[in-house]
Image: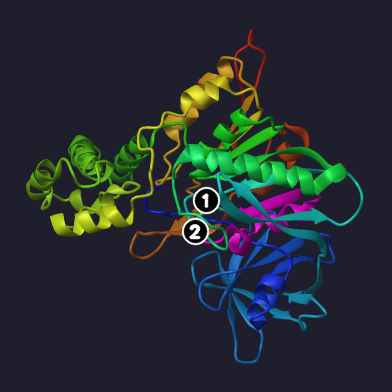
C-alpha cells in the first residue's frame, strides 16, 4: 500500500475532538425510532458522511438554511434524503422522516508508549456494567488520524461491542515517524491491545483485532506476538507487496479487456517495482526502455497496479525525489504465509472479488488452503465488491464510483467479534467455514 490509498471507514461519538466547528459537533451515532443506527462522520471539506450498519451510505452537503442534502454513496447524485441536526447540546438528528438521538458511550482517551514512541488512543464502550467484547482497530496505510476518521469506533459500540482506536505512529496526535514496517506496526498493535484490555478492566471480554488493507499484514503478526481471541482481516492480503502490485496490474488488463497484453504489462510493472523497491538505485534504464517501447500501445494507459502507476510518468530526477518522499520502510518482499500457518488465533478474512488495490483471487486461494489444512479460519468473498468492501457502478467515463458497503459486511464482523463464528448468509458473500482436518472445507453461499 505504498501510495497510502485506502478506503477508510472512520470515527467516534465523543464530540470533544470536534468542538471547533458546527459540522463536527454533529459527528456521532444516532438511534432511530425503529432501533436502527445511523452514523455521522467527517468527510471531505465541509461535508459529512452517513452510514448504516446494513451498508447504505451517503454524503451530506451543507445548505444555506442549515439543512444537509444527501447524495447516493460516493456518486454525488442526490438520493432524496434531507438531514438536519438540533443544537449540539441536544444531540438529535432528523434523518428523512425519522428523528434520532445521539448515543452516549463511555469514552476514555489515553496515551501509551511503544518502543519509545508515545501513541494516542481511545477506548469507546457501550454504556453499562456488562462485560462486552472489544475490538482493536488496526490501521491501513492511510496517513490520517484514525481517532478522527474511523467510524467503526462508534458503529461497533452502537452494537454492544467495545472499540479501541489509536493514531498509528507518525499520524494524528501520535509521535514517531510514519512507517509501513509491519513488525513495528504489529508491536504497536500489541501495546494498543494491552492498553484496551487495561482500560476495559472487568468489562473487557473477548478481545482481538480488525485490520483493513495494510492492517491485514499487521494484525495477524500482532496476534502471533500476544494472545488474542480473534483477528479480522478486511480487504487484506496473504501475498507480498510486490505480488499485490503485479496482481493489480493483471486485473487492470482484465477489466480493460487487454488480457492478451497482460505479460507485457507485467514486464513493465516488474521493472517499475524494482526502481521503487531499490529507492531509485537500480533498474531505471530497463524501466525507461520498456516505457519507450510500450507507451504507444493501447493497454499502456490502463496500467495502474497498487503503486507502480506513481512512477510511470516520472523522469529519473522526479523518481529520485518521489522515492525519498515515500521511503516508509515498506517490506516489499514480506511473505505473510509463515505467520498465517503458525497462528492459532481464529481469523475471519473478508475480501471483494473486484478489488484492484488488494486483488483477492490468490489470497482467497491461500486462505482456503489453510482452512483445508485445519486452520480455524473463515473466508468470505463478496462478488462485485472492491477495496473497502464497497459495491460500485461505472460513471460516464467508465470509472468506478462506490455506491454502498456490501450487505452483511458490518454484521459479519460483529458476529465474529462476539462469537468467533459467523452464520451461513451475509448478503451475497461466498463463505468458506473452518472444518475438521479430516473433512474438506465447507463452502456455503
Tell me which numbered mark, 1 or 2, is placed earlier along the sequence: 1
For the residue pair 378 and 161, the one nearer the viewer reads as: 161
Tell me, for residue 402, which label it has, or none.
2
Q: Residue 344 appears in which quarter of the rendering?
A: top right
The numbered mark at residue 125 is none
* Magenta-drawn segment: 143-167
Q: Residue furthest top?
A: 438
User: Where residue 281 appears, x then y in whole percent?
Assistant: 18, 44
Q: Position of residue 111 (x, y in %)?
A: 67, 55
Please name whichever residue, 59 or 383, is drawn nearer the observer in this view of the structure.
59
**What's the mark number on residue 388?**
1
239 versus 271 height, above or below? above
Identified at 27% across, 48% down, the residue is: 308
Return the x and y of residue 263 as percentages of the image width and height: 20, 34
State the residue at coordinates (15%, 58%).
317
In this rendering, the answer to whether 140 lies above or below 365 is below
Helix, strand or loop under label 1: loop
Magenta span has 148?
yes
Amino acid at each position: 500500500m505504498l501510495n497510502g490509498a485506502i478506503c477508510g471507514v472512520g470515527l467516534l461519538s465523543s464530540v470533544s475532538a470536534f468542538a471547533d466547528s458546527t459540522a463536527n459537533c454533529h459527528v456521532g451515532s444516532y438511534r432511530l425510532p425503529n432501533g436502527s443506527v445511523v452514523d455521522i462522520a467527517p468527510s471531505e471539506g465541509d461535508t459529512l458522511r452517513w452510514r448504516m450498519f446494513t451498508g447504505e451510505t451517503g454524503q451530506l452537503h451543507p445548505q444555506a438554511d442549515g439543512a444537509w442534502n444527501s447524495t447516493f454513496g460516493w456518486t454525488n447524485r442526490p438520493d432524496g434524503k434531507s438531514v438536519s441536526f438540533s443544537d449540539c447540546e441536544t444531540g438529535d438528528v432528523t434523518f428523512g422522516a425519522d428523528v434520532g438521538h445521539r448515543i452516549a458511550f463511555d469514552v476514555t482517551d489515553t496515551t501509551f508508549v511503544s518502543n519509545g514512541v508515545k501513541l494516542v488512543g481511545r477506548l469507546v464502550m457501550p454504556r453499562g456494567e456488562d462485560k462486552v467484547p472489544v475490538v482493536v482497530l488496526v490501521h491501513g496505510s492511510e496517513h490520517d488520524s484514525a481517532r478522527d476518521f474511523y467510524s467503526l469506533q462508534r458503529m461497533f459500540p452502537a452494537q454492544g461491542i467495545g472499540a479501541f482506536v489509536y493514531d498509528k505512529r507518525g499520524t494524528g496526535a501520535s509521535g514517531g515517524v510514519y512507517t509501513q514496517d509491519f513488525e513495528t506496526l504489529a508491536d504497536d498493535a500489541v501495546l494498543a491491545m494491552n492498553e484496551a484490555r487495561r482500560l476495559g478492566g472487568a468489562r473487557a471480554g473477548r478481545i482481538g483485532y480488525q485490520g483493513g488493507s495494510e492492517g491485514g499484514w499487521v494484525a495477524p503478526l500482532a496476534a502471533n506476538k500476544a494472545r488474542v481471541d480473534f483477528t479480522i482481516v478486511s480487504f487484506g492480503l496473504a501475498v507480498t507487496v510486490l505480488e499485490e502490485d503485479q496482481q493489480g496490474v493483471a486485473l487492470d488488463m482484465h477489466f480493460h479487456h487487454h488480457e492478451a497484453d497482460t505479460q507485457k504489462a507485467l514486464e513493465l510493472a516488474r521493472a517499475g517495482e524494482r526502481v521503487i523497491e531499490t529507492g531509485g538505485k537500480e533498474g531505471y534504464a530497463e524501466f525507461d526502455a520498456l516505457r519507450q517501447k510500450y507507451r504507444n500501445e493501447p493497454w499502456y494507459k490502463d496500467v495502474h497496479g497498487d503503486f507502480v502507476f506513481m512512477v510511470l510518468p516520472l523522469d529519473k530526477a522526479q523518481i529520485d525525489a518521489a522515492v525519498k518522499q515515500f521511503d516508509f520502510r515498506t517490506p516489499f518482499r514480506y511473505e505473510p504465509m509463515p505467520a498465517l500457518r503458525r497462528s492459532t488465533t481464529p481469523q475471519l478474512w473478508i475480501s471483494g472479488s473486484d478489488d484492484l488495490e488488494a486483488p483477492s483471487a490468490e489470497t482467497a486461494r491461500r486462505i482456503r488452503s489453510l482452512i483445508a489444512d485445519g486452520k480455524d479460519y473463515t473466508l468470505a468473498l463478496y462478488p462485485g465488491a472492491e477495496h473497502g468492501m464497497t459495491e460500485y457502478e461505472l460513471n460516464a467515463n467508465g470509472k468506478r464510483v462506490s455506491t454502498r458497503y456490501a450487505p452483511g459486511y458490518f454484521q459479519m464482523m460483529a458476529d465474529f467479534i462476539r462469537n468467533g463464528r459467523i452464520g451461513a448468509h451475509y448478503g451475497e458473500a461466498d463463505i468458506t467455514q473452518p472444518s475438521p482436518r479430516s473433512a474438506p472445507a465447507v463452502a456455503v453461499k
